[in-house]
Image (tube, rainbow, N blue to C red):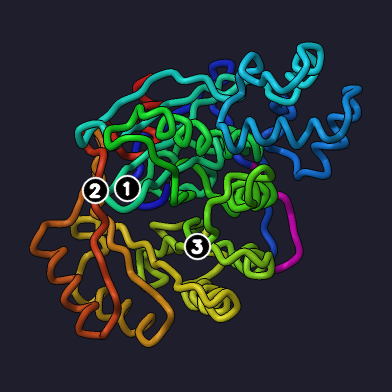
Amino acid sequence: MRGGWGTFTTLVGNSREKASHVSQPPGQLTFVAPRRAKPARHLADLNMAARRAAVAELGEKPFRADQLSRHYFSHLTSDLEAMTDLPAAARERLGALLPTLLTPVREMTTDAGTTRKTLWRLFDGALVESVLMRYPDRVTMCVSSQAGCGMNCPFCATGQAGLTRNMSTAEIVEQVVAGARALAQGQIPGGPGRVSNVVFMGMGEPLANYKQVVEAVRRMVEPAPDGLGISARGVTVSTVGLVPAIGKLADEGMPVTLALSLHAPDDELRDTLVPINTRWKVAEVLDAAWAYAAKTKRRVSIEYALIKDINDQEWRADLLGKLVRNKLVHVNLIPLNPTPGSKWTASRPEDERAFVRRLEFHGVPVTVRDTRGREIDGACGQLAAAE
């Protein structure tokens, strides 16, 4: 994640693998994960029509797909023994569509148990993390979309470690299902509940794994038994600014919130903090964000990690205010979550307050993010690094 996520190293076969770039026409850029075995096909990878076809391939009647989907998306179970409305022989065959995708390695909790961070091991040994955060009025799941990240932002050690691979649609969805299951079973203090919000702010650049992320969002927002039935307005997709993909997302017809990880209002600094800025400059990225807002009628969230003596000067707050005022926008300031050994750290409280005042002077809606999870290595990737 951009803006405060910490140390991350994924080792597969004792080697770190980096993303590669593929030559594209001007204005296009594709990030390609290293070639490797794919995770097994899962029910959540497929829309309902494809599920029915897959069930038929297994020798079962297509309506079994509806039953299987109801168990997974409504009852939040992958336990075949609990699916007593399915004949035993059918359960055995249909189990092929419910492979284990995520294995919990470690869990840590804080905030009296209402914040839970989970480190997952994928089938190939890659490590990713998700965070469940329960508030009085909502439950938010922060999910990863890639193992590692290829964006190379220097203050984010996840990006510094490079990209291991893209996650599959079902691997992304399963993070939310696992959180929803824990809530439904009363494992999180506050009694049974449901996931109301999903933010793609875990490991990875979501729009660099575009197809799988969009399909995962569809599984999340489709009503049961097709999906989890979460409101699209409760889903936030973040990006460091992949301009063509932002335009493409606007055309998907899903009113999800776009969160733009800006982190600097000037090209000189942003070229350093967010290297993709050397391809798409601040003005171009913001134009794409305003076009997204105009098309979807959804307010864009500008994510800005406040880094001590780097990007927290009042003149930068003024410049940011001038760039975004009078737009359908909200600025979300993020106190950088410091990680061991890093030279990057959060702004001084007085500088944070001054930054907020300057944005408010320009009439820009602004909040400072609640920094949950610091006690449990809340910055994305820290558990993976410790492991």
Upstream in sequence: badge 1 or badge 2:
1
**Circle nearer the viewer, 1 or 2:** 2
**Quadrant containing the C terminus in the rendered view:** top left
> For this view, does 160 lie left or right of residue 42?
left
Residue 314 pos. (x, y %): 19, 74
Q: Nearer the viewer, residue 214 or 324?
A: 214
Quadrant in the picture for residue 195: top left
| Residue positioned most to the front | 85
Residue holding disc 3: 233
**Circle nearer the viewer, 3 or 1:** 3
Q: Does 59 appear in magenta?
A: no
User: Mark 3 packing: few (<14 Cα in 10 Å), some, or many (20+)?
Assistant: some
Residue holding disc 2: 371
Query: How far separated are the C-alphas under marks 2 and 3?
Result: 22 Å
Write the start and end of the magenta stretch as one range: 20-27
Q: Is residue 114 above or below residue 26?
A: above
Q: Is residue 85 above or below residue 339?
A: above
Residue 382 shows up from this direction:
yes
Residue holding disc 1: 4
Mark 1 secondary-structure assignment: loop
Quadrant in the picture for residue 288: bottom right
Residue 305 pos. (x, y %): 30, 57
Mark 3 secondary-structure assignment: helix
User: Is there CB contact under 8 Å for labels 1 and 2?
Assistant: yes
In the rendered structure, which amino acid carries the disc numbered 1? Gly
Residue 193 pos. (x, y %): 39, 40
